[in-house]
Amino acid sequence: STVVDGFRTFDLTAAGGVTDFGHGGTRTAGYNGTYLGPTLRVKRGERIRVRVRNDLEQDSTVHWHGAILPAAVDGGPHRPIRAGRTADMRWTVDQPAATLWYHPHPDGHTEDQVMRGLAGMFLIDDDDPRTAGLPHEYGVDDLPVIVQDREFDRRGQFRTRPDFSSDIGVLGDTLLVNGVIGPYREVRTSLVRLRLLNGSAGRPYEFGLVSDHEAGDRGFQVISTDGGLLAAPVARTRIRLAAGERADIVVPVRPGERLTLRSLAPSPGENLLVRRFEGGMDSFDVLELRAAATLTPSPPLPPVLSDLPPPDPTGAAHERSFEFYQRTINDKSMDMHRTDLVAVAGTREIWTVHSTHLMPHIFHLHGQRFRVLDVDGDPPPAELAGWKDTINLPMGVRFRLLVEFSGNADENTPYMYHCHVLRHEVEGMMGQFLVV
Ligand code: C2O
Ligand code: CU
Ligand code: CU
């Protein structure tokens, strides 16, 4: 990026291409390349400008998933970038450090454009001195991990039609991690931060780590959720991410070992049908970390990562409830000409979201953040206690969320909320809201 007229400026060109994954050339699409796009890294307070050229053969947009920004630059379906045109998106970064991502969101084509490869990471840094010691050298001790499942057909092309037994679109049998099959990374520091992004169309992952030097799970610390750092690191051996969710974890590394990030089949307590239909029986190796024989000691993890007071629902302006069933939200499917609700900028609302459908859905909200107040009346687990914009909805579980509407008001351009199973989004599981 360069700074032009006070704006940190990025150029993205979305275009089709052919990528060699070892299957003889696969038709894909990417930003500034043939698959995925560059990681954009910005600082809180910066004014940024992104020029997006659309060299695809159809409309596209770039949506900034997790970003707090005006609706006019949110990249929703109301602002298509026509084939051959360039959009100019500008805003001021006004949110704490977080791991966000970007992907297309045009009417009716989100799933196929993301599946072709259009997506990238969007990282926000801030200067909170308390977190200066976190691993942050990109590609060295701070690694992006974009996880996507794909399946290749006999001609080496991505399969796009789901199997009859899947209700969440195509479940691939091959993982692409940062666009690569079977990646490894050499590491030289005693702590490594992995920015996990489930960039798949629907498949959930349950991540864990194993070492060739010992039996059992390697524990790690969860330091952030979708929208920012937790109050303090949380020790875990597994973390589950639904499509669209992110978490940063910090992993301790021992000299000379090979440490494998895996996605494991989720706990046997879950409904068997759901596990089968959403791919929950599958396990994958995601990424191998190859530790050098001697490691540079990393600074210890800071005990306090952010101010994250417990969410306080007093003074909430509204309470609303959203039921996810089959392909509808509150019995409605997406209508670009209908506004489903209007919220007031700078206020907070309590939203109850739940799925009454056998298949889990994933609630996602554009342009704002939320906190989880409770899960079926209980406090959220530590890894759901931070800022969120995307949350998995297992059948029958009620999540009460405290939604914080930003100060960005625009009575003409709606934001979206939708299921982040991209097949469901395309099939209409989406609503629109205005912030005024
Ligand atoms: Cu990541 Cu509306 O989506
Ligand atoms: Cu989004
Ligand atoms: Cu859904």
Image (cartoon, rainbow, N blue to C red):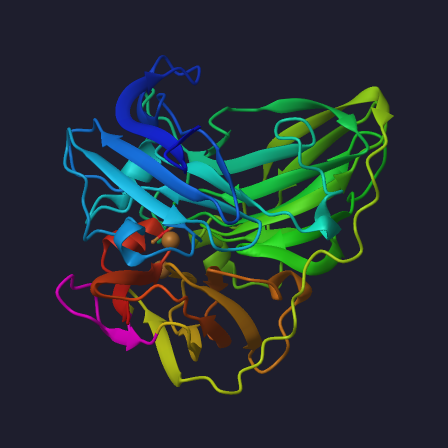
Above-or-below relation of 7 to 127: above
Q: Position of residue 263 (x, y in %)?
A: 60, 42
Residue 190 lies left or right of residue 9; in this view the side is right
Q: Say if 47 sits above or below 23 in the image.
A: below
Residue drawn where x is 35% and y is 21% of the image = 34
- In the image, the segment drawn in magenta is 329-344
Percent across and percent down for residue 188 are 77, 24
Please tell me which residue is depicted at 38% across the width and 59% down the height of the picture.
367
**In the depicted view, which residue is nearer to us: 73 or 60?**
73
Q: Is residue 160 visible?
A: no
Residue at image point 52% right, 59% down: 272
Q: Quadrant of residue 83?
A: top left
Answer with left or right where residue 219 lies relative to residue 178: right
Q: Position of residue 96 (x, y in %)?
A: 56, 54
User: Does the magenta segment cover residue 173?
Assistant: no
Asked whether, in this view, residue 143 is left or right of residue 105, the answer is right
Q: Residue at x 28, y 72 (%)?
A: 436
**Vertical placement of residue 97 versus 356, above or below:** above
Q: Ligand 3, what quadrant?
A: bottom left
Which of these two is toward me, 161 or 368? Answer: 368
- Which residue is most to the front? 5
213 or 399, which is in the foreground? Answer: 399
Q: Main secondary structure of the magenta part?
A: loop
Tell me if residue 341 is in the magenta stretch.
yes
The quarter of the displayed image where residue 254 is located: top right
Quarter occupied by the N terminus: top left
The x, y position of residue 228, in whole percent, is: 58, 55
